[in-house]
Structure formats: C-alpha cells, structure tokens
Image (cartoon, rainbow, N blue to C red):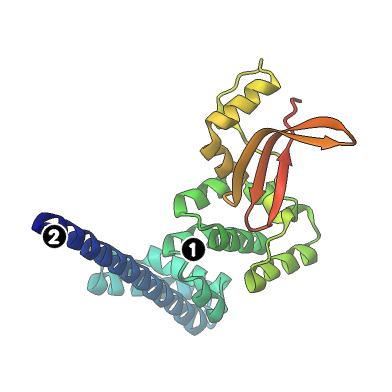
Amino acid sequence: MLTTQSESKVLFQDIRKLIDETRSSIAVAVNAGLTMLYWKIGKRIYQGTLQKNRAEYGKQIVSLLGRQLSTEYGRGFSEKSLRHMIRFAEVFPDEKIVSALLRQLSWTHFVAIIYLSDPLKRDFYTEMCRVEHWNTRMLQRKIDSMLYERTVLSKKPEKLAKMELEQLRDEDRLTPDMVFGDPYLLDFLGLKNAYAEKDLEAAILREMEAFILEIGVGFAFLERQKRITIDGEDFYIDLLFYHRQLRRLVAIELKRG
C-alpha cells in the first residue's frame, strides 16, 4: 500500500510532467505563430511597398514604419527586425513551405539562413535543420564550418542538386551525397602532428559525441575493430556505424595523410 508521502510524490511527478509538456507545446505554438506573423509582415511590406517604389523611398518607409511599430510594440519590430522579415518573405515566398517548417525551425534559425546568398545552400541548411533537428547553435556551427561546400551534393550540377533537395523536402529522402563530406574537420581531437592511426582511433572514441556531431547526427556508433571474414581471411573495420536515415551500415577506415 502506498503511503501518503509516496503517493504525493508520484502525483507530483505526474503533474509536473503534464505542466512541462504543456509549457513546451505552448512555446512551440507561440514560436510558430510569431514566425508566421513575421513572414506575413515581411510579405506585406515587400509586395506592398518595396516592389512598387524606388529603393531610397522604400528605405525611408521601412525606417519610419520601424519607429512607429517599435514605439507601440517594442524592439521586436524595429527597422532592423523589419528588414529581417522582408528578407524572410523574399527568399521564402511560398507560405505552404514556411508553414511546414514552423514546428522544426525557430525564427532564429530562419535569420541565420535567409542571408545565405546561394538558394541551394539555403535549402540545404533548411532541410538538414528539419531532418536532423539542429538547434540554432549547431546550425551556425555547420554554416561557419562550410558544411554544404564540403558535401558531395555541392559538387553536383545545380539541376541535380535542386532535385535531391526537393526530394528531401517532399519525401524525406536523404541521400548519401547530403550526408558524407570531404574533408571532415577533426581539430577537436587535439592531436598534434606526430600521431599514429591507433591514436586517431582512440581520440575519436574518446570524443565520440563531438565526432558524431561533425559527421552527422544520424550516425550511431556500433563497434571498433569489427572483424569480417572474406574467403577465409580476417579483416578488421576500424569503426563501424549505422546511419538511421540512410538505413545502412557505414564502415570507416582510418588512414593518415
């Protein structure tokens, strides 16, 4: 039989869970609502003013509007914020696409993405954020480390790259060309110039969390020095991973140079 104290503890834990879950869902809903509001404001200004007037006149209107709105609604509607909203609507013109992204991407995600000049690069980071659930810090780290430029996808003809990104958006079809990069940046391992392959393997195992963040969060580590036998001869795979979205094993052979 439960005592009064133990029953109260169980009840407290259940109610706390309900409160935390509700707060989280409310925060997601509020973020989605505000982000859509920002998109609609940007669209209204862009289509209603900037497309119809000269650049200098449009700049004056946005400046005046920012002062008026920030006086009434706070700094979130300053001239600088309005320019973010305008850029948002300009590079994401499809409301349906924006609406579909709102549960995974916050306003700060979009602000980091919208100023990327290459449309394919914008689409890549947008979809990878959605699929791999990057927070804004991770997104900025990936952009700063030029992840897109290091993927096989970026080396493809524009038409093929665009097709693969559309498949990812419409069908959640992630391809190896989006996952694998060249080169990988392993500075976080702290290795100096003189080290052996076994040192590299040991450092990766020691910093496995950081290593997976570098190669992609879809990877799950399975085993080191995995033995496989082919035609009666034993071979050893340095590191064996499984990629959840690709649904395939990934063998990594470590070599220096």
| Residue 250 placement (x, y as % from top left) | 71, 45
Question: In the image, residue 180 lies at what x, y percent?
Answer: 70, 48
**Disc 2 marks which amino acid?**
Ser
- Relative to 166, is 17 on the left or the right? left
Q: Is residue 180 above or below residue 126?
A: above
Residue drawn where x is 65% and y is 44% of the image: 241
* Number of the label disc, if any, that sits on residue 192: none
* Front residue of 222 and 53: 222
From where the camera sits, is residue 182 visible? no
Q: What residue sits right under mark 1 in the picture?
A: 110
Local packing at callout 2 (Cα closer than 10 Å; few below 14, some 14-19, many 20+) is few
Looking at the image, the residue that sits furthest to the right is: 231
Q: Amino acid at mark 1?
A: Phe
Q: Residue at x 31, y 71 (%)?
A: 26
Q: Quadrant of residue 231?
A: top right
**Could you say whether the residue bearing mark 2 is in a helix, strand or loop?**
helix
Q: Which residue is mark 2?
A: 8
The earlier-in-sequence mark between 1 and 2 is 2
